[in-house]
Image: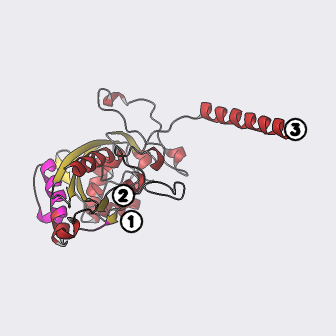
Amino acid sequence: MSRTKFLSSTLNLLLTGQRKMQSSHRPCNLLCPVAPYAAAAPRLQQRPPHLLGTKRLLSPPRRHSEARLLSGMTPMATSSSPTANPQPFKLILGSSSVARKNILNEMGFEFQVMTADIDERSIRREDPDELVMLLAEAKADAIMSRMNISDYQKEGDQPTLLITSDIVVVHEGIIREKPSSKEEARQFLKGYSGGHVSTVGGVVVTNLTTGKKLGSLDKAEVYFHDIPDEIIENLIDEGVVFRVAGGLLLEHPLVLPLVEAVVGSSDSVMGLSKDLANKLIHEALLA
């Protein structure tokens, strides 16, 4: 067989195999966790009857290559895209949250991290919408108070944006922030079992170059199957529940299989809505 015919035959085989793989592929919703927990995850093909008429069910978090970037922006350079254009602005994340760092990384942004180190419990409001916006603004103000703002306002420099956020869980009308004790964490998680909670997130983006500040809210709902006591105790023993609002760690492999449905977006529940962050960053660059 000639070399040309051999290459042609090989190419046809590869294309045939690729088509078969594509035709057999079934998209996975959020409730399909990564192995080894895939077998335990519920697979919802349609909305539960009690959720009919609500917003769409949660779609899976977008991978970096699928992230919707701001108009005119390019993803940060990676080993697979060494010729990518640099980010046209500087970004500071005002949080030490691992989840928020991961979300910005998934969105393709380059950023540095600064923490506010404020006493969040000293800021109290009964309205969760008002509370999260006040906390997000307080974090921005605290970080900016330690900066020499004139350094970010030099002519010809790239604009610098500071993004801060806060989130609370609302259960049966009561605001729940990070649990302060094992008993409180146990009470929170037992209360979610077989029920649902709402999350309210506030995001503020400050253009340090122009001084403009923009903010908005994003909300979601999480519906749970029954949560076994053993799972609750394991989560408390790990200590992860004390670092998140309401002790709610949606992406944890022990929690994810127990999620019946989410109305909204997973990134919003985890602390930073990608869509809202993109919108505010775009508007702040124009401000």
Q: Is residue 13 above or below residue 152?
A: above
* Mark sitting earlier along the chain (1/3): 3
In the displayed orientation, state which residue is furthest to the left: 125
Is 168 positioned to the left or the right of 83 in the image?
left
In the structure shown, which secondary structural element does the residue marked by tag 1 occupy? helix
Residue 56 locus on image (x, y percent): 34, 33
Q: Amino acid at mark 2?
A: Ala
- At a point 50% along the width and 55% down the height, the residue shown is 83
Q: Amino acid at mark 3?
A: Ser
Q: Amino acid at mark 1?
A: Asp
Residue matched to label 3: 2
- Applied colour scheme: secondary structure
Residue 68 locus on image (x, y percent): 39, 43
Distance from Cα at disc 1 to Cα at disc 3: 66 Å
Q: Marks 2 and 3: in contact by CB < 8 Å? A: no
Please tell me whether mark 1 or mark 2 is closer to you in this view: 2
Specify start and end residues of the magenta stretch as a single range.
113-140
Q: Quadrant of residue 230?
A: bottom left
Q: Is residue 169 visible?
A: no
Residue matched to label 2: 99
Residue matched to label 1: 237
- At a point 36% along the width and 45% down the height, the residue shown is 72
- At a point 45% along the width and 50% down the height, the residue shown is 64
Residue 126 locus on image (x, y percent): 10, 51
* Mark sitting earlier along the chain (3/2): 3
Distance from Cα at disc 1 to Cα at disc 2: 20 Å
The total of numbered circles placed on residues is 3
